[in-house]
Each structure stands twice: as C-alpha cells, then as structure tokens.
Image: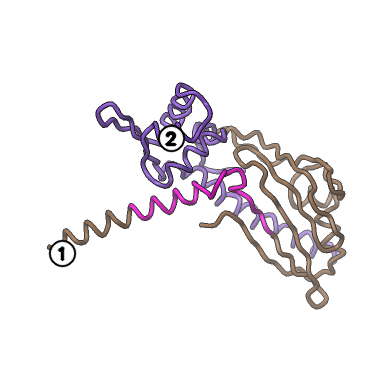
Chain colours: A purple, B brown
C-alpha cells in the first residue's frame, strides 16, 4: 500500500470523535472558542487540548480578536485524508483486474 | 470527489465461479492479500495488505462479514489505519453466460456525527480558491 501520505499527525488528529465534530462545526465557518465549547460536555481545558492537537496538525488556525480566540478550518491540509480515499480507488482497480485475470486464467488450464 | 468508490466489471464466467473466487480464502489470497476469510455472516477476519509506516498503518485490515448470500451478494466491514468501519461489497448479476460484478467500497464518512467535513472541507477549499481567482480576475479587468 504505497502512497505519498506522510502526515500521521493528521490521522491522529482526526482519530478522535470530538475532534472530528469540531472540524465538522468549523466546516460551516470560523467560530470563537466559546461557540465550539458550547457543543461539548467536556471542560474548557479539555476543549482547548483538542483544539491544540488540531492546531498542531495544521487542520485549524487560531486568531485572537481582543480576548476572543477564533478557529478556522484549513481544508487544504485535509489532503492526506482525501489521498487515502483516492489511494483505495487505485487499490481496487488493481485488485479487481487481478480477480478478472485469476478467473480467466483458470479456464485456460 | 465522492465518499464511495464504485466499480463495475464484466467477467466471462458464471456467478458461481466468481462467487468462489471472492469467497475462497486461497483464491482471495491470489488476487487480493493473505487472509483468514470464511463465508459466513459474523465471521471476523483480517487481510494483510502492505503497510504504510509513514501514515501509521501496520497493514492489518480488520473485517467482519456483514452479508453473505451465495451467489449474489457479499459484504464485509473494512477497518485499517485511518480508515474505520468502511464497507466493501460485491453484488453479482448474471450477464449472458458471464457475470456483472458491482463492487463498492463505501462509508468513508461513517464516523462523522453529521455530514462529512473532509468532503465539505474540500468544497470549502475550492470555493475559496474560486473566490480568490475571481477577485484577481476582477482586479485585472480594472
């Protein structure tokens, strides 16, 4: 399974359901941290910790407006996730071709 | 971009033979990868594909047979590395003396609470790029 994917931190970042939900919320537009935190049962420090992981993976950016912090999705950096799906597209092309060969080769025996 | 991969191929063999090739562990190893597949619903098995250490993927795909109706429908779950709980299915329909195989690998967004940020994100990225492009184009017109 050779691919050009080389950013395990992106996959680590999206491996947690809360972080996926945060990305989902941010896909609708930029949001202040309070608005994000309102969607979760967890404590504010826990929310911040998840946001930190998303920041480190480059999936979101943080901007300060006075005392408010706002988060924004960086869709370009979701590339590795989309690459993974594109990779499976080629993977199945190859293997279904092999299935076809496997079946047609047998009749020649 | 779609969240489901669909393929359709015609194989000049009857359904029973195609069914055998997709459900026999040895045959599967020949065209796919080593596995401990058994054709019964609920059976858990693994497929050992080449890994990708850079993506934190050890090459072990965990699967469970979800549907098994010989000789027409086979479906199993497929979880490996960052891909969690996707679904692989094979539907076989007779076509003349051969078989039309409808293959689908779906559910790449199954873990999303609502919708699909990866694809929405892609859309967002393009919208922004197009906006920037039209802003540049408009500026150039002036």
User: How far apart are the alpha carbons under marks 1 and 2?
Assistant: 41 Å
Mark 1 element type? helix
Magenta highlight range: B104-128
Mark 2 element type? helix
Q: Nearer the viewer, residue B78 or B32?
A: B78
Residue A75 coordinates in the image, percent (x, y): 41, 45
Left or right, residue A1 beside residue A10: right
Taking the magenta stretch, the answer to whether it contains residue B120 is: yes
Taking the magenta stretch, the answer to whether it contains residue B36 is: no
- The residue that mark 1 highlights is B141
Left or right, residue A67 beside residue A50: left
- The residue that mark 2 highlights is A36
Which quadrant: the N terminus of chain A?
Answer: top right
Rendered residue at 16%/60% (across/down)? B140
Q: Nearer the viewer, residue B15 or B79?
A: B79
Image height of A41 relative to A88, above or below: above
Q: Chain of mark 2?
A: A
Residue A87: assigned label = none
Image height of B114 relative to B96, above or below: above
Left or right, residue B6 beside residue B126: right
Which quadrant: the C terminus of chain A?
Answer: bottom right
Residue B77 coordinates in the image, percent (x, y): 73, 46
Q: Quadrant of residue A68?
A: top left
In the displayed image of the protein, which residue is found farthest to the top?
Answer: A45
């Amino acid at each position: 399974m050779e691919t050009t994917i080389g950013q395990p931190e992106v996959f680590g970042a999206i491996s947690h359901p809360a972080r996926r939900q945060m990305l989902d919320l941010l896909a609708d537009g930029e949001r202040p941290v309070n608005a994000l935190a309102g969607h979760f049962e967890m404590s504010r420090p826990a929310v911040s910790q998840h946001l930190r992981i998303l920041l480190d993976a480059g999936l979101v950016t943080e901007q300060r407006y006075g005392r408010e912090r706002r988060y924004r999705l960086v869709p370009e950096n979701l590339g590795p996730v989309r690459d993974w799906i594109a990779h499976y597209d080629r993977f199945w092309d190859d293997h279904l071709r092999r299935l076809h060969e496997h079946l047609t080769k047998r009749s020649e025996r | 971009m779609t969240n489901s991969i669909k393929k359709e191929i015609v194989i000049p063999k009857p359904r029973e033979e195609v069914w055998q090739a997709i459900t026999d562990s040895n045959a599967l190893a020949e065209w796919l990868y080593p596995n401990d597949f058994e054709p019964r619903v609920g059976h858990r098995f693994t497929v050992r594909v080449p890994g990708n250490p850079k993506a934190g993927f050890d090459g072990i795909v965990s699967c469970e047979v979800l549907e098994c109706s010989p000789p027409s429908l086979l479906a199993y779950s497929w979880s490996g590395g960052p891909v969690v709980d996707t679904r692989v299915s094979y539907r076989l329909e007779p076509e003349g003396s051969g078989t039309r195989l409808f293959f689908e690998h779906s559910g790449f967004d199954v873990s999303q609470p609502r919708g699909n940020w990866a694809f929405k994100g892609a859309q967002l990225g393009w919208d922004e790029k197009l906006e920037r492009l039209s802003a540049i184009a408009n500026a150039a017109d002036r």
